[in-house]
């Protein structure tokens, strides 16, 4: 079970009741892992008793949270020019078709004059095109009443936004290609609505054509383009004929049906791919239009990431499945971590810690890995963080070196700044149980650009055997028992990713059976077994057996 991570991530939409565990959404504002009672306000773990006034950082994070959630009047009210700020924020996001921005705050810095600066990374999803990523800074100034406000300037929104220059979105209309599955069966948006976001993006390396566009910086007076800030979509012309994908119509139909029946109307996504070659058999998104969460989403993977953490520990003989690694209710590393429902397993073996997803046990092993080792293992053995060329735009994961012990503890259990999506976690599962990373692919023969992908190292056979055994035990007697009555030697891992104080947790489940690996995330699903579990169960129950 997954920890009660105090990450300060706040997103748009309703503000549901507080529960013991929370969620992150695809359009989240990912802020640093927060500490103690400052959780809801977003005070990160990197502020200590010395340095900038914590109230300044709190105000910065609250501003970013409001902006990302679409609470623009509230965000503007945290600035020195509320009226102007609200107008600019609204025109910026609406004018560039941005929805669900994700804003990642960095530690605050104090200048000699007492002002405070909070750098942040902005990931702005541009509808139908992709994500525009850039960095900016929030200047904060203490007011006469002792409060802090964002010292409003246009550069708060983007460093190049000014009184003389603004941004303009230009779209290039293109005809969507005809798309077929691996057997030549036509895949239409009418029959497979969940494929809509995917088919519109085909061609990012597979010779197809999809939506193209750009964000330009232009002179406010003349409209002249000064520079291009971001380009989206393939720039090659598709050859005549349909785009043949690796998708399987049977698997795709089963995936669409599983999401429709069991996602309960929540934002969700899943990917199913072949273990032996990485070819993607199904990509499904809920809702069926808009953002391609399955391939381009950025989520904390929660305890599904313990597959990678376990691999890192086993690779250096830092732990063995039968070693006793105690699982207490709480463990404090800069802040208090805990297990879902305050579970504890005194005297548990590491195998038990894995199958019951004990956060405190995994965190207690953090000193057995070097600070950058988890990211190195993720990249070298699992390909995570390399540049993938899938055949459509994709986010390929990030495992930054932890900035302190609190963040290192969080990264051990797939929180902190670790980012993934169903595509990445399906691939991670496939690599874990086969030992060999195969870059996922969506279009047949898609090798363009793959020479840029660093070769990976196969996992030792002994490590693979241990991973398979623990994944299987998680189904037969652990948190993935929801799959235990299905036929076949299924292995799985659940995950519950908490990232916000005012939303329910994301639910994750990854699984493998035969030659297939699957990963599913359900936003605000509360638990992995309870939300993603039924989706994956329905998929595996209905999927074509002959393709495994």
Image (spheres, rainbow, N blue to C red):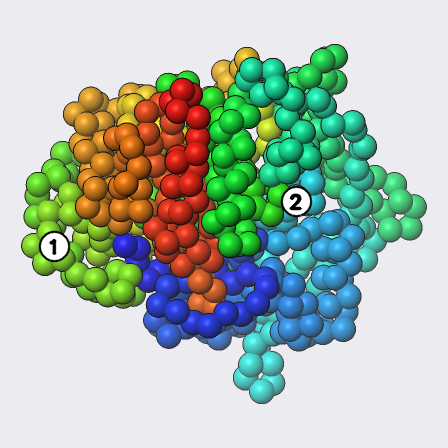
- Between disc 1 and disc 2, whose residue precedes? 2
**What label does residue 290 carry, if any?**
2
Real-space Cα distance between discs 1 and 2?
Answer: 45 Å
Q: Quadrant of the C terminus?
A: top left
Q: Is residue 148 above or below residue 33?
A: below
Left or right placement of residue 353 versus residue 373 in this view: left
Front residue (pair 526, 97):
526
Q: Quadrant of the N terminus?
A: bottom left
Q: Nearer the viewer, mark 1 or mark 2?
A: 2
Picture coordinates of residue 40, whole percent (x, y): 45, 71
Front residue (pair 398, 240):
240
Q: Residues within 10 Å of mark 1 (few under 14, many from 20)?
A: many
Q: Residues within 10 Å of mark 2 (few under 14, many from 20)?
A: some
Find out whether the residues at labels 1 and 2 contact each other: C-beta distance under 8 Å. Answer: no
The answer to whether residue 134 shows anywhere in this view is no
Picture coordinates of residue 221, whole percent (x, y): 91, 50
Left or right placement of residue 344 versus residue 509 in this view: left
**What label does residue 326 carry, if any?**
1
Identified at 35% across, 68% down, the residue is 20
The answer to whether residue 172 shows anywhere in this view is yes
Q: Quadrant of residue 241?
A: top right
Identified at 28% across, 30% down, the residue is 488
Identified at 43% across, 44% down, the residue is 535
Front residue (pair 484, 246):
484
Q: Is residue 43 above or below residue 495?
A: below
Identified at 19% across, 27% down, the residue is 465
Picture coordinates of residue 255, whole percent (x, y): 50, 36
Element type where label 2 sits in the image: loop
Front residue (pair 92, 182):
182
Element type where label 1 sits in the image: loop
């Amino acid at each position: 079970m997954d920890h009660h991570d105090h990450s300060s991530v706040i997103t748009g939409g309703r503000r549901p009741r507080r529960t013991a565990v929370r969620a992150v959404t695809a359009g989240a504002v990912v802020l640093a892992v927060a500490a103690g009672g400052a959780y809801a306000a977003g005070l990160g773990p990197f502020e200590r008793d010395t340095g900038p006034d914590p109230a300044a950082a709190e105000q910065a994070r609250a501003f970013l949270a409001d902006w990302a959630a679409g609470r623009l009047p509230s965000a503007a009210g945290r600035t020195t020019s509320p009226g102007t700020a609200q107008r600019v924020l609204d025109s910026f996001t609406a004018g560039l078709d941005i929805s669900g921005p994700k804003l990642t705050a960095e530690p605050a810095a104090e200048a000699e004059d007492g002002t405070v600066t909070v750098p942040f990374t902005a990931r702005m999803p541009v509808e139908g095109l992709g994500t525009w990523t850039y960095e900016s800074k929030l200047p904060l100034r203490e007011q006469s009443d002792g409060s802090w406000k964002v010292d409003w300037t246009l550069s708060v929104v983007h460093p190049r936004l000014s009184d003389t220059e603004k941004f303009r979105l230009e779209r290039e209309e293109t005809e969507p290609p005809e798309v077929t599955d691996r057997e030549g069966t036509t895949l239409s948006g009418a029959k497979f609505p969940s494929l809509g976001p995917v088919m519109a993006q085909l061609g990012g390396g597979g010779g197809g054509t999809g939506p193209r566009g750009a964000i330009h910086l232009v002179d406010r007076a003349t409209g002249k383009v000064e520079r291009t800030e971001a380009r989206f979509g393939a720039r090659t012309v598709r050859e005549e004929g349909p785009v043949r994908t690796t998708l399987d119509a049977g698997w795709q139909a089963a995936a669409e049906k599983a999401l429709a029946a069991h996602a309960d109307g929540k934002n969700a996504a899943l990917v199913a791919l072949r273990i032996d070659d990485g070819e993607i058999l199904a990509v499904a998104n809920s809702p069926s239009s808009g953002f391609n969460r399955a391939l381009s989403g950025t989520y904390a993977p929660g305890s599904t990431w313990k597959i990678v953490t376990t691999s890192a520990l086993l690779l250096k003989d830092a732990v063995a499945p039968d070693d006793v690694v105690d699982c207490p209710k709480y463990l404090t590393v800069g802040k208090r971590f805990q297990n879902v429902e305050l579970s504890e397993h005194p005297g548990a073996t590491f195998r038990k810690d894995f199958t019951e997803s004990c956060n405190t046990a995994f965190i207690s092993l953090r000193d057995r890995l070097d600070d950058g080792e988890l990211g190195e293992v993720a990249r070298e053995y699992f390909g995570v963080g390399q540049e993938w060329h899938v055949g459509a735009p994709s986010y390929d994961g990030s495992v930054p070196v932890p900035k302190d012990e609190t963040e290192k503890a969080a990264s051990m259990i797939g929180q902190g700044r670790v980012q993934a999506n169903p595509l990445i976690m399906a691939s991670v599962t496939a690599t874990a149980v086969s030992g060999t990373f195969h870059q996922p692919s969506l279009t047949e023969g898609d090798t363009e650009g793959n020479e840029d992908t660093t070769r990976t190292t196969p996992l030792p056979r002994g490590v693979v055997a241990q991973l398979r055994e623990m994944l299987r035990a998680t189904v037969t007697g652990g948190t993935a028992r929801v799959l235990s009555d299905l036929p076949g030697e299924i292995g799985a891992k659940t995950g519950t990713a908490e990232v916000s104080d005012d939303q329910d947790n994301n639910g994750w489940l990854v699984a493998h059976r035969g030659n297939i690996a699957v990963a599913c995330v359900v936003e605000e699903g509360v638990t992995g077994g309870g939300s993603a579990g039924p989706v994956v169960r329905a998929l595996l129950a209905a999927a074509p057996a002959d393709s495994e």
